[in-house]
Image (cartoon, helix red, strand yellow):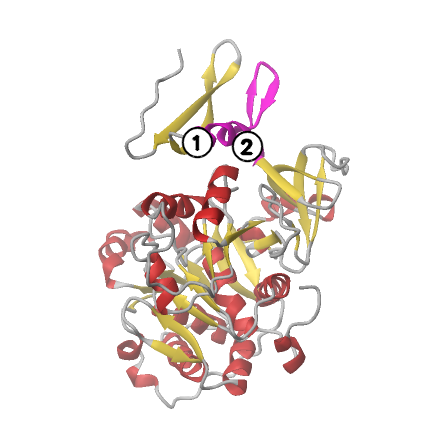
Amino acid sequence: MNGKTEQELEVNEPQNISALLEQRAQATPEKYFLFSEADGRRYTYAEFDAAVNRAALLLAAHGIKKGEAVSLLMPNSAEYIIAYFACFKLGALAGPVNSLLKSEEISYVIANSEARALLVNSEFLPRVEAIRDELPDLKHVVVFDDEAKATADFTGVDLPDVVIEKDDEAIIIYTSGTTGKPKGCLLTHGNLIANARQITEWLGFTKRDCLLTIMPLFHMNAVSVTTMTPLYAGASTVISPKFSASRFWQIISDYQITSFGSVATMLSMLLSIYPDGVPDGLQTDQLRFAMCGSAPVPAEVLKNFEETFNCLVIEGYGLSESTCRSTFNPPDERRRPGSCGMPIGNEMKVVDDDDREVADGELGEIVLRGENILKGYYKNEEATRHAFRNGWFHTGDIGYKDADGFFYIVDRKSDMIIRGGENIYSREIDEVLYKHGAVAAAATIGVADPLYGEKVAAFIVLKDGAEASPPS
């Protein structure tokens, strides 16, 4: 885990993602890199690189140049991944658009990034046409349902000669916007390669691994953890259109998946549908662990999942601004359920409101520093300065570090409930609720109260067939 991987010993780390892909295509051209679970297509490293080149030429034919943004609005698919890498080839910025957003939110993301082109699946084309008049910078809308058909005219054509440096932007991805308008995070080629290296080394991935993407590709989890990481490791990846609990274990067996990215809700759904474990007749012995992030996994869910499916859950922590992962639990006996783990290559500490580091066990704000941390927010110097004050990126997350260096995330700073002057962390209440045998899911929030300022409210989903009485 702490040494060099076999891939690092074989090749020197390139300065940009395009060079990394070309390096893999030259070293192992016949090895399969990408499997499309929806339709059975598969691409060797050489075939994937060729498809990316054709898609890059398609963009170049529409005038896309280095430094310009290209919005991507598609379902999970091979086309989505090819589109990302086509942008990387040209030195353009890939701008994933969350397909769950409302029309006005989609318009804001595309317009704010000043995207010159949009690669879109025809499923979403009517939504784009409805807001087209609001997007004066958007010059080209290209339907990208089938990469082979869309790029058929670009076989054998040379790519433009572009110099791409480590610090050049590769992705502009927008935050959730919980405090005002979403901000465009600028992630560089160096950020993405660094995070892929950090994850590969920490979790011990090799070219023998095969990772599954069921998280949406408009989030950095799917891009960094289960796409860029297998590329860095010289491994393989499977793209699935979306998470399907009913088909999940069949996919794990069919593709001999060794690890997958997930969130706690997915683990809970699998427990609900398969209370007796993996269905008979499926081969899942090769599955090493589930990687889980985005939100802490309730301790009861983690324990039940591991016991039911004989599969470790490796929790991690990160955010778009840290490319994706900043921590992971060690994938061995040191793993601590309930902790988000230890830093995987970046610096991390807990500070008070005056940016002074607090003692072990004390709550404070998590701050980060390292080569996986974003370059800044797009055209938002004020937000960038505020986030990077005193040389550290301030996450807005509340947590603590124990004496052994393991970190724990308690809550979002903005989500903390203050009742009568007392700080209440919703996750602590969630953990208690999950221990009730009838509870399938729980979420605690603060609601306005005229006397105490805020009071606690909890939303609970019961397990199928379970009953519970409200508190008296």
Q: Residue furthest bottom?
A: 156
Which SS class for mark 1?
A: strand
| Pick the front one: 15 or 214 | 214
Is 390 in the magenta? no
Q: Which residues are magenta?
A: 411-436
Where residue 196 appears, as percent x and y from the top left, is 57, 65
Pick whichever of labels 1 and 2 is earlier in the sequence.
Answer: 2
Where residue 137 appears, as percent x and y from the top left, is 38, 60
Task: Decide if residue 312 is on the left or right side of residue 365.
Answer: left
Residue 69 in sight from this viewpoint: no
Where residue 186 appears, as percent x and y from the top left, is 55, 57
Check disc 1 and give the amino acid type: Ala
Q: Which residue is mark 1?
A: 443
Q: Tell me if residue 432 comes above or below residue 469 in the rendering.
A: below
Location of residue 71 (image quadrant): bottom left
Q: Tell me if residue 106 comes above or below residue 202 in the rendering.
A: above
